[in-house]
Image: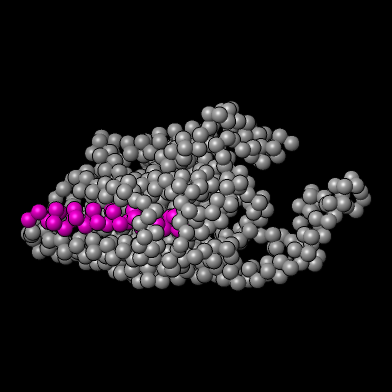
Amino acid sequence: MFSKIAEIYQRGRTIVPDKYRKKQVVYFLVLLGLTMDNFNVTGAMTTEYSIEQMFNVTSTTASWTLSAYALTLGSFIIFFGRVGDMIGPHNAILLGSSGSAVFSLLTAVPQPSIVALIVFRAFQGMFAAALMPAGYAIAANYFHGEQLGMAIRFLAIVLITSFGVGTIAGGAFSLTKIGYQGFFYFTCGISTFCSVTLYFLIIPVKESKEKKNMHVKDLDFIGVIFFVAGLLLFIFGLTEAGISWNSPKVYVTIPIGVLLVLTMLFYETVFMSRYKKKFEPKEAEAGNHSNQSLSTSVESGPEKGSVTDLELDSNRVAPGGGKGWLKNTQLLFPAEVFKITNFFPLIISLFSLYISFIDVLTSLLQYDVLIAGDSTLMASVKCFPMAVATLCSALVYSPKIPKKLGFNNTIRLCALACLGGSFLIWRTDYKVENEYWKYHFVALIIMGFFCNLYFMVYLNAIMSETPLHLQGVVSGIFQTSGQVGVSIASAILSTILGPLEKQPRGSPEFENQFQKFRNGFCISIAACGIFFIASLFIKDLKVNVAEHDEHDEESTAGTSLEVDESIISHKK
């Protein structure tokens, strides 16, 4: 039954002739699908008030509609990134888009209880986890040289500006009669359009030599279970910490989650890596012997005792005897990942930048509503200059900037600029006339411009240093670090701010709430400080994407449709 379904699925993808498939059009649809990921994060921030009113629940309960999404999104990104490398990013993007569309619809449909809404949001986040790694991998596989640089520019625009646009869209829909439901009907429509159109138009990524040896059935599922469970517990604990740190939901789940993640990393990076290395010399010797046997069988025809490709694959015997299932295990964290230049400093810098970004955006949205007295829509509009600055930064960006300043110096400049913007926001004072224009507006412009510059430089560096068959998992690792940063920022900010309610202007409670917001702005200052310290350890890179060696071009998708091997296998 499943084979027939798979065959029908593959046949449907061959309906549109090759000549009508253009990678530029496909990439546009991929980027459009990626915007729904950030829309479902920032839009949920500004529709939270609508959810409170419709379900008659507290802000703490309503916040779980966002937390559940972030929980599964952060926990499954690396897993789907690795799976995407195995099944192809073109299949992963279809899986993510279609799943997001289905659960966006279920989220939009009126629910009898907020619990059902939270559950559907969790599944929505899980499928959204497949989008971002696949988007990175498709960009790296579809484009090269200057085209890849341009693709990264558009990717950076989508990553940042969709935050601002999603905030405004959520605020606008929250003012309508159907409230949050209208927003999720909107995201459902976009996701459905992308998934259906991509199904017919997407160009399968041609398998590289390395990918042909990667199979989902060989994935380290033990490590996956430990890692996903650990992240779920860790992020859940941080989410609950926003209510109270003195709870078993926090001081039990966080340590257990960390322990599971560390156990998994030790299992893969120490035990499994050493085990697999034992077979490398024997494997090379066995490979040479197999090649000789195959050459003989090709010249003289199949003979008794000759070794064929089918036998080599089906037996999967480890050199030295015994079944090689453990030797053939595909690690969630391949050893090559940790050899990427600047891997750890860039992970820390991205993690810190996400903390700063979420702290500033979330704090200002609530500050403008509770202290400045604005509506949710106006509060969203006030934060929009950050998205505008991002767009301007992307338009004026040139690879000559990091080449002239140096890759490491450009990152440090971004860190210092974000630190300055955070300090300017911290100085905000509702007693000062035109405080928005003096403190918020300028700071948002600075942070938006240099956040995008950082993303442009960081994405160029990572994509140029990462092998094509690992693009998905590497981007997943970086995105996971960002999502963990989001959870940490939300937990600390919620702890500092406490329960939020509108207070009479000028009252002691109002002043106390204002001081809490100022303390919350300090999170961004601290995060940008860590960002700058991490940037001091970043090595300079002499090669950028525009000048990157294009020796991998043969293993990527072209303008015409490559025959997917899965189609051939099903036809057989």
537, 179: nearer the viewer: 537
Residue 43 position in % (x across, y down) = 32, 45
Which quadrant of the figure contains the N terminus? top right
Q: On the rendered structure, is 191 left or right of 550?
A: left
Is 437 covered by the magenta stretch? yes
Q: Main secondary structure of the magenta part?
A: helix
* Residue span colored magenta: 433-462
Q: On the rendered structure, is 139 left or right of 386?
A: right
The residue depicted at 92 percent of the width and 50 percent of the height is 304
The residue depicted at 23 percent of the width and 54 percent of the height is 444
Q: What colouring does the structure picture have?
A: one colour
The residue depicted at 74 percent of the width and 68 percent of the height is 281
533, 79: nearer the viewer: 533
Residue 192 position in % (x across, y down) = 45, 35
Is 312 covered by the magenta stretch? no
Let me know if residue 22 appears in the view.
yes
